[in-house]
Image (cartoon, rainbow, N blue to C red):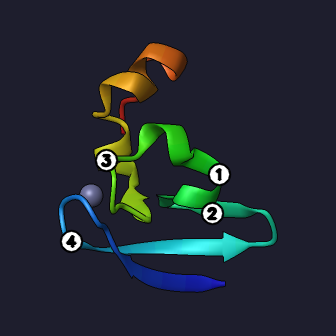
Amino acid sequence: MQITIRCDRCKKLVKGCKTEGFTGGYYIRAAWNKFMRPGEHKVCDSCMWKTPAYIKVYGKVSS
Ligand SMILES: [Zn+2]
């Protein structure tokens, strides 16, 4: 299912997709809590990929 979300960090609208147990194009707090700042619920790929804690675990992602 295609959806559009607003990133809580950069406030941009991001096109993503959602299937059962999986999101594409953005990250949700339910699954990615430890990489999010207080008050954030959805974060787009490019913001998440710049998060120092994320890079520590998964390395640098180039889009
Ligand atoms: Zn963002």
Give the percent coordinates (x, y) of residue 12: 21, 71
Q: How many marks?
A: 4
Q: Which residue lies furthest to the front in this view?
A: 38
The residue where tag 1 is placed is: 31
Local secondary structure at mark 4: loop
Regarding residue 44, the answer to whether it shows in the image is yes
Q: In this view, does 61 lie above or below 14?
A: above
Q: Residue at x 40, y 50 (%)?
A: 45
Local secondary structure at mark 1: helix
The residue where tag 4 is placed is: 12
The residue where tag 3 is placed is: 46
Any mark on residue 23, and which?
2
Marks 4,2: beta carbons within 8 A? no
What is the spatial separation of the Cα atoms under label 4 and label 1, in whole angstroms? Answer: 21 Å
Label 3 C-beta lies within 8 Å of the nearest ligand 1 atom: yes
What is the spatial separation of the Cα atoms under label 2 and label 3, in whole angstroms? Answer: 14 Å
